[in-house]
Image: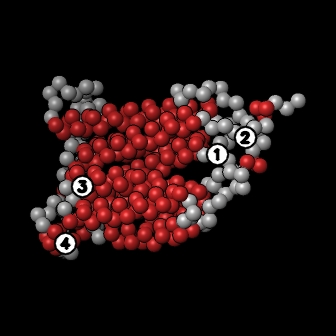
Amino acid sequence: MTSEASTNPVKHDHLLARFAWFVVGYFILVVLWGAVVRATGSGGGCGASWPLCNGYLNPLHHPRVATIVEFAHRQSTTVATCLMLALAVSTFRTTPPGHRARRAALWTLLFLVIEALLGAALVLRGWVENNDSIGRVIAQAVHFTNTLVLMAALSLTAWFLGQRPTESGSRASASKLTAWGALIATIIVGATGALAALADTLFPSPTLTAALAQDFAAHAPVLIRMRWLHPAAAVVALICIVALLRAGRRSPIARVLLALLGLQFVLGVADVLLLAPAWMQILHLLGADLYWIALVLLAAESIWPAVPTSEIAVTYQPEAASVL
């Protein structure tokens, strides 16, 4: 006799999904605090020491402001690491083998390790504070790209945990090529934006006219002469995203993405007109993070659509329903 548990669709743990979204929110705060570290020139606050800070577990007996800022960021990343590990363990305890949330959780842990190694490289190589070497330029772009991919994997973990099977299968109308194109173009925008923010921090301009003149000056530093890449990449990404929005316009996420796209345009213009003060850079980054998450979820509807109910044959009985 077939039991009721073996005929019902898979039941997702909503408590775990909410916990996953909490981890996403906390990670956004960690990313924003990392921007504070860069904008305040506090990346060398712990010296050329990692994972210790100035050679100590607790360096705050004679602290500098830069040390407090950098040490707080390192502690926040430690908490984020623990939360992501707890999420991954809970995901594997709660979901059936082959569940897409498991794969997303594993990708999250992989990019988390890479994130830590890239952060360590920045510190140990001295690519912090006022360093404007080619090595830092490359590392900064790679570091921000990995941050975006990590945020995407973490958001997909939360999304897949809360996603229910559909009655009729996939309702996404955008092609996978369109979705991937929008994601890759946006990653390029993010990487070039990180370099533009670094240039604004290291080489501030007194006026908008002076900033524009710097962009085209032959003697300007490499970072300054690269600033044009960010708006140029944004134009290309806009074309890709409009195509995705048109194809997936029936999705509720498309409306959220469109609103965030407009907000990012306003924040980007304000950032330029205000000469990129630190608070504006952080606000712009917050908008970018929210926009990126919405884009990932809309693209996921085409790349990884919800599983039809008819394809689910058995129900998995989790060993534990808790998030820890």
Residue contact at pointers 1 and 2, CB within 8 angstroms: yes
Q: Earlier in the sequence, mark 1 or mark 3?
A: 1
Indicate which label's residue lies in the foreground, 1 or 3.
1
Please identify the quarter of the rendering in which residue 192 is found: bottom left
Q: Gap in Å between the C-alphas at discs 4 and 1?
A: 50 Å
Q: Earlier in the sequence, mark 4 or mark 1?
A: 1
User: Which residue is tagged 1?
Assistant: 164
- Give SS at disc 2: loop
Q: Earlier in the sequence, mark 1 or mark 2?
A: 2
Amino acid, disc 3: Met
Disc 4 crowd, CA 10 A, few/some/many (<14, 14-19, 20+): some
How many numbered marks are there?
A: 4
User: Which residue is tagged 2?
Assistant: 9
Indicate which label's residue lies in the foreground, 2 or 4.
2
Q: Gap in Å between the C-alphas at discs 3 and 4?
A: 19 Å
- Give SS at disc 3: helix
Q: Residue 220, percent across and down?
A: 18, 68
Amino acid, disc 4: Leu
Image point 70% across, 55% down: which residue? 169
Task: Establish if 112 lies above or below 231.
Answer: above
Residue contact at pointers 4 and 1, CB within 8 angstroms: no
Amino acid, disc 2: Pro
Image point 16% across, 31% down: which residue? 63
Q: Residue 196, percent across and down?
A: 27, 61
Please identify the quarter of the rendering in which residue 10 is found: top right
Residue 136 visible, this orientation? no
User: Which residue is tagged 3?
Assistant: 280
User: Which residue is tagged 4?
Assistant: 212
